[in-house]
Image (cartoon, rainbow, N blue to C red):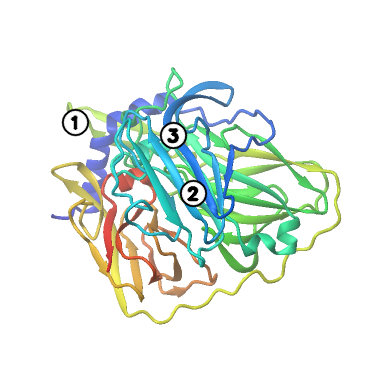
C-alpha cells in the first residue's frame, strides 16, 4: 500500500473527521470546568481469591449509574463504574464466568498479566456474542509480578467504544511488595481514572460525534466513578496511591499540590527503590504506584491533571483545523481544537484531606532488584505512521500496513530476547503496548534510559525512536501489540505476533 506524506495526511484527516469534529465541538467547547462532589472515594465491590481460587460471575451490560450527580446509562461490569476490583496472588487459579448482555460482541483482556494468550486465558481473538456465556480460566504463574493490572474489552473494532462506555476494572496481584513494612503500614487507595462524554439522555456520545482521528476524550473525568471525590492522608504517615489510566485516549499528567510523589512501581512492576517525582505522566493503559508523605501543613490539597499536548492533525491560521467536507465543497473547521482536548487546562481530579496524626513512617530504602536482560538475539524495527486504505479510509499503521486479522506480522521464538526499535513518524504521540510479556526500555533517541523498570506500555512521542528489550518466556501462541490510544488501535495501528 502506498504511503502518504504529512501534508496529504493532514488534509485527508480533516476531510474524514470534519463533520464529526464540528458536531462534537459545539457540545463540548466550554464543558471542562469540573464540578465537585467532594464525597469520599467509593470503591467498587471487591472479589479476592480464597484457598488459591478467584472465582466470580461477571456480566457486561448497559446499566444506570450516578455520574457527577447525573443519571447516566453506561456500559458496566456487574453494574459498577469502575468494574469490581479483583485480587489474587501468584499461583492462584482464576475462574471468571462471563456473560455478555451487551448489544455488541465483546471479550476480555487481562492487561499486563503474564498468562497464556490462547484458549480460556488472555485470548483477544475470542468473540463472545450478545447473550452468550464464556468461562475464562487460567493460573497465575508463581513468578507472576505482584502489582496493579486491569481488565477491559479487546474485540478489534469495538475496543475504544466499549472502554469509553465504561468497561474497565482493576486486577490486583498481591505479593512481596505489599509485605514491605513501610508499604504495608501505608494507607492504600485505588484510583481508576476514566473520562466520559454523555448526550442529552445520559448515554455515551456516539462515535460519530467524536474526533476518532485524535482519539476520543470526554468532558467528564471521573475518579472511581465520581467527580472530584476526596480521600484522606494521615499526618506523618504514608499514603499509597495505585493509579490506573483507564481512559480510551486521554493522557494524565498528575501533580499533587505541595507534595512530591515517590514512585514505587510502574505498569504493575516494582522499581528498585522509591523515585521522587514532581509529576506523573500516565498514558492510556499505564499504571503507577506512588507513596505520598503526610509531612505538610494539614489542610486540603488538590490532585491536578496538568496540560499535555499529545499532538494533532494540523492547525491552520488562528488555531483552526480545517478540511473539505466529504459531502460538499465547504470547509469544516474546528476552532480551538487544542482547547477541546484540554491541552491548556489544569483540572482538579480529587481533593486530599489530612486526617489524624499517626506515628511517623519512613520511606522504604530498597524494594527489589531488577535484573538486566541479556543482549538481544535479534533487532526488529517498527514504524508508527498513517495512511489511507480502500476498506476503512483513514488508517493508523505499523510499518505502512493496517491491522489484518488474517496476517501474522511478527514471529518470535520462545526463550529468546529481542530488541524492538519503535519509531513514531506521525503527528501524534502513541503509547505502544505489548501483550503477554513485559519489557525494559533501553533507550530513547539513542540515549540510555535512566530508570530500570519492567513495563508493558511505553510512550513513543512524535519524532522519537524508543528501543525496548523483550524476553519471550513461558507461553506460545498468537497475540498482539498496538497503540493504546484505542481509537488508533481500532483504526489499524496493531499487529499480530506469533510466539513459537
Q: Which marked residue is nearer to the observer: mark 3 or mark 1?
A: 3
The CA distance from mark 3 to mark 2 is 16 Å
Q: Is residue 283 visible?
A: no
Among the two numbered marks 3 and 1 on one chain, the one whose residue lies closer to the N terminus? 3
At label 3, counting other C-alpha atoms closer than 10 Å, the crowd grade (few under 14, some 14-19, many 20 or more) is some
| Residue that badge 2 annotates | 150
Q: Residue furthest top?
A: 201
Q: Nearer the viewer, residue 283 or 116?
A: 116
> Is 316 drawn above or below residue 468 in the view shown?
above
> Is 245 drawn above or below residue 30 in the view shown?
below
| Residue that badge 1 annotates | 326
| Residue that badge 3 annotates | 59
- Identify the residue shown where x is 53% and y is 51%: 53
- Identify the residue shown where x is 41% and y is 74%: 446
The CA distance from mark 3 to mark 1 is 40 Å
* Location of residue 415 (image quadrant): bottom left
In the visual, does 254 lie left or right of 439?
Answer: right
Residue 288 in percent (x, y) is at 57, 55
The CA distance from mark 1 to mark 2 is 39 Å
In the visual, does 232 lie left or right of 223?
Answer: right
Q: What secondary structure is marked by label 1?
A: loop
Residue 425 in percent (x, y) is at 30, 59
Q: Nearer the viewer, residue 157 or 27?
A: 157
Q: What secondary structure is marked by label 3?
A: strand
Residue 61 in percent (x, y) is at 42, 29
Among the two numbered marks 3 and 2 on one chain, the one whose residue lies closer to the N terminus? 3
Amino acid at each position: 500500500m502506498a504511503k502518504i506524506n504529512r501534508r496529504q495526511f493532514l488534509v485527508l484527516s480533516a476531510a474524514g473527521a470534519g463533520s464529526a469534529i464540528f458536531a462534537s465541538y459545539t457540545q463540548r467547547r466550554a464543558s471542562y470546568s469540573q464540578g465537585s462532589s467532594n464525597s469520599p472515594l467509593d470503591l467498587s465491590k471487591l472479589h479476592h481469591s480464597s484457598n488459591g481460587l478467584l472465582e466470580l460471575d461477571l456480566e457486561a451490560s448497559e446499566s444506570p449509574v450516578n455520574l457527577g450527580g447525573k443519571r447516566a446509562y453506561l456500559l458496566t461490569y456487574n453494574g459498577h463504574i469502575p468494574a469490581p476490583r479483583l485480587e489474587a496472588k501468584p499461583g492462584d487459579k482464576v475462574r471468571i464466568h462471563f456473560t455478555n448482555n451487551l448489544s455488541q460482541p465483546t471479550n476480555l483482556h487481562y492487561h499486563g498479566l503474564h498468562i497464556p494468550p490462547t484458549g480460556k486465558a488472555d485470548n483477544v481473538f475470542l468473540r463472545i456474542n450478545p447473550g452468550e456465556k464464556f468461562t475464562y480460566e487460567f493460573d497465575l504463574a508463581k513468578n507472576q509480578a505482584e502489582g496493579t493490572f486491569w481488565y477491559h474489552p479487546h474485540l478489534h473494532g469495538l475496543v475504544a467504544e466499549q472502554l469509553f462506555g465504561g468497561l474497565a476494572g482493576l486486577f490486583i496481584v498481591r505479593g512481596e511488595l505489599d509485605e514491605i513494612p513501610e508499604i504495608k503500614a501505608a494507607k492504600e487507595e485505588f484510583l481508576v481514572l476514566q473520562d466520559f462524554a454523555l448526550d442529552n439522555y445520559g448515554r455515551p456520545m456516539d462515535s460519530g460525534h467524536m474526533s476518532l482521528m485524535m482519539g476520543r476524550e470526554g468532558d467528564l473525568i471521573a475518579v472511581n466513578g465520581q467527580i472530584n471525590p476526596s480521600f484522606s492522608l494521615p499526618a506523618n504517615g504514608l499514603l499509597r496511591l495505585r493509579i490506573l489510566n483507564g481512559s480510551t485516549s486521554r493522557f494524565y499528567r498528575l501533580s499533587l499540590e505541595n507534595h512530591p510523589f515517590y514512585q514505587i512501581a510502574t505498569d504493575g512492576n516494582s522499581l528498585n527503590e522509591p523515585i521522587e517525582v514532581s509529576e506523573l505522566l500516565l498514558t492510556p493503559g499505564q499504571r503507577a504506584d506512588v507513596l505520598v508523605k503526610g509531612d505538610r501543613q494539614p489542610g486540603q490539597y488538590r490532585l491536578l491533571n496538568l496540560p499535555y499536548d499529545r499532538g494533532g492533525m494540523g492547525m491552520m491560521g488562528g488555531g483552526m483545523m480545517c478540511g473539505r467536507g466529504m459531502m460538499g465543497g465547504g470547509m469544516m473547521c474546528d476552532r480551538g481544537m487544542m482547547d477541546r482536548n484540554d491541552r491548556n487546562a489544569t483540572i482538579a481530579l480529587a481533593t486530599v484531606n489530612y486526617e489524624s496524626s499517626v506515628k511517623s513512617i519512613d520511606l522504604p530504602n530498597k524494594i527489589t532488584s531488577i535484573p538486566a536482560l541479556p543482549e538481544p538475539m535479534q533487532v526488529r524495527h517498527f514504524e508508527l505512521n498513517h495512511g489511507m486504505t480502500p476498506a476503512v479510509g483513514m488508517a493508523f499503521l505499523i510499518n505502512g500496513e493496517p491491522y489484518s486479522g488474517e496476517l501474522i506480522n511478527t514471529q518470535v521464538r520462545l526463550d529468546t530476547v529481542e530488541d524492538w526499535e519503535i519509531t513514531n513518524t506521525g503527528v501524534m504521540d502513541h503509547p505502544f503496548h505489548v501483550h503477554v510479556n513485559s519489557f525494559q526500555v533501553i533507550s530513547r533517541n539513542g540515549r540510555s534510559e535512566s530508570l530500570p523498570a519492567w513495563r508493558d506500555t511505553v510512550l513513543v512521542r512524535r519524532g522519537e525512536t524508543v528501543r525496548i528489550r523483550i524476553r519471550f518466556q513461558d507461553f506460545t501462541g498468537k497475540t498482539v501489540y498496538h497503540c493504546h490510544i484505542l481509537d488508533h488501535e481500532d483504526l489499524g495501528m496493531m499487529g499480530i505476533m506469533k510466539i513459537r
